[in-house]
């Protein structure tokens, strides 16, 4: 009785080890394949170089110098071409409450963020300005 219980526990443990080894192998091969495919299609050369994008701000609109984005690091140059004080805020996957200081008319400020695949909101955080039209969403990836 005691011997047979011991034997079956050892057998169980062997099975569990073999099973988890198989899982690790499966995860490795599928993860590696996905990663290689992703970097090939998203232009790995851009990552880390801080692509500059100009965001022109006026009453009450945002105008971006480019509309197509791939994952990577971006430096947004927020150029206040209006008369009132504005600022630039970005929200999205991995980016929360990133914003420039307040920018007087005719001045500019920069904001560097790393964008992943997904949807990001760019807007002016000065109360009321977002609702008046200083709001633009971009799709990355
Ligand atoms: Cu504003």
Image (spheres, rainbow, N blue to C red):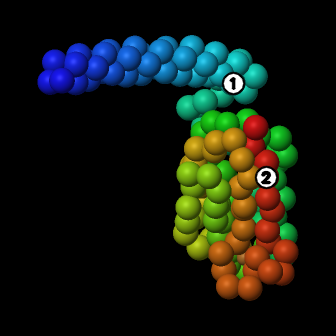
**Quarter in which the N terminus is drawn:** top left
Q: Nearer the viewer, residue 54 or 16?
A: 16
Asked if residue 74 shows in the view, the reply is no
Q: Is mark 2 within 8 Å of ligand 1?
A: no
Q: Is residue 2 above or below residue 61?
A: above
The percent coordinates of residue 118 (x first, y second) are: 72, 47
Task: Classify residue 1 as left or right of residue 25.
Answer: left
Q: Which mark is residue 38?
A: 1
The percent coordinates of residue 97 (x first, y second) are: 55, 65
Label 2 and label 1: CA atoms lie apart by 19 Å
The first of marks 2 and 1 along the sequence is: 1
Task: Determine the image quadrant of residue 42.
Answer: top right
Q: Residue furthest front?
A: 1
Q: Residue furthest bottom?
A: 128
- Identify the residue at horizontal 56%, vertical 61% (top origin): 96
Q: Residue furthest left?
A: 2
Ligand 1 placement by image quarter: bottom right
For mark 2, what is the residue? 138
- Identify the residue at horizontal 69%, vertical 24% (top origin): 38
- Identify the residue at horizontal 66%, vertical 51% (top origin): 76
Asked if the residue under mark 1 is in contact with the one under mark 2, i.e. CB atoms within 8 Å, the reply is no
The percent coordinates of residue 127 (x first, y second) are: 68, 85
């Amino acid at each position: 009785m005691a011997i047979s219980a011991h034997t079956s526990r050892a057998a169980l443990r062997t099975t569990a080890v073999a099973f988890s080894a198989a899982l690790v192998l499966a995860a490795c091969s599928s993860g590696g394949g996905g990663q290689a495919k992703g970097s090939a299609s998203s232009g790995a050369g851009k990552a880390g170089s801080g692509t500059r994008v100009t965001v022109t701000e006026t009453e009450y609109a945002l105008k971006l110098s480019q509309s197509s984005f791939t994952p990577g690091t971006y430096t947004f140059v927020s150029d206040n071409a209006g008369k009132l004080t504005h600022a630039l805020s970005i929200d999205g996957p991995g980016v929360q409450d990133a914003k420039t200081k307040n920018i007087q008319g005719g001045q500019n400020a920069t904001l560097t963020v790393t964008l992943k695949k997904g949807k990001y909101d760019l807007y002016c955080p000065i109360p009321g300005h977002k609702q008046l039209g200083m709001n633009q969403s971009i799709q990355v990836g």
